[in-house]
Image (cartoon, rainbow, N blue to C red):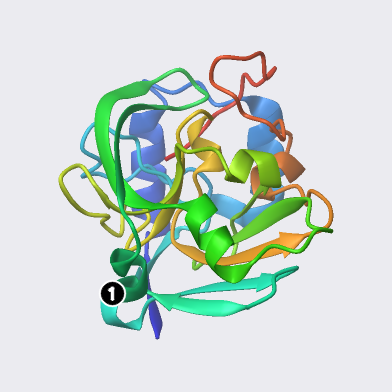
Amino acid sequence: MVKKVAVGRRVFLGMAGFAAVGIAFGAKIQRAVSDVVGSGFGGLLPGGDHFRIYTITGQLPVIKPEEYKLEVSGLVERPASFSLDDLRAMPSVSLVRDFHCVTGWVVPSVHWEGVRLSHILESVGVSPSAVALSFDSYDGADTESLTLDQARLPDVIVAYKMLGGPVTVEHGGPVRLYVAPMFGYKSIKWLSAIRVVDRVEPGFWEQNGYPLNGWIDGSTGATDPGHE
């Protein structure tokens, strides 16, 4: 069962006012996303460990680690459902990388640990007709996408540890995606499902104006707010 902790409207408005001091929200994206998800957009939450924590729904989905499941389906030979223990039993990888938000703030030298997404894809067997991956979140709202080539990069992981411990609820735990070479909006939190598909399906933020490819060291044209 997924329990959701609400971020109340009064709390949200107070936090959003505080956040406005340090974050310049892009008006075009702000209006577009607000039309979709209402006043929950951009709820800045405390306890971020130097991250600026946001929720697009006004709630945080709380998934008990023992109940966590990652569903992998679509154009694969062996659809699978992985528990947190299953993921921990796979070959692990550790990274120390900066986390970049598209707005410009950076958290340096974040320690990440998990399993390479490429390993999960190998374990289920990807169909020759596959082109991309589509990701879903336990929050019921966020989605993301990567091409198959991007998903197979060695620094794209399904993370179950960060900052020296398990991924917290605020940071998208118990399991989240971490796409090291791209801005934070590509690293979907509360990862619930991976679908292997035959075309790129733009995610939530791409549908609201963000570029499909959020490379940190390239020109994305993005000047509107990112999130963690």
Taking the image as shown, residue 164 lies to the left or right of residue 200, namely left
Q: Quadrant of the C terminus?
A: top left
- For numbered disc 1, what is the local secondary structure? helix
**Total count of labels:** 1
- For disc 1, the marked residue is 65
Q: Residue at x 30, y 60 (%)?
A: 169
Q: Residue at x 26, y 56 (%)?
A: 168
> Could you classify mark 1 by the number of other residues whose Cα lies within 10 Å: few (under 14), some (14-19), or many (20 or more)?
some
Q: Residue at x 66, y 73 (%)?
A: 73
Quadrant hosting residue 107: top left
Q: Quadrant of the N terminus?
A: bottom left
Quadrant hosting residue 82: bottom left
Q: Is residue 153 above or below residue 12?
A: above
Q: Is residue 123 visible?
A: yes
Give the residue type at disc 1.
Pro
Percent x, y for residue 173? 33, 60
Name the residue nearer the viewer: 126 or 197: 126
Q: Residue furthest bottom?
A: 1
Percent x, y for residue 219? 66, 13
Percent x, y for residue 101? 46, 27
Taking the image as shown, residue 190 lies to the left or right of residue 121, namely left
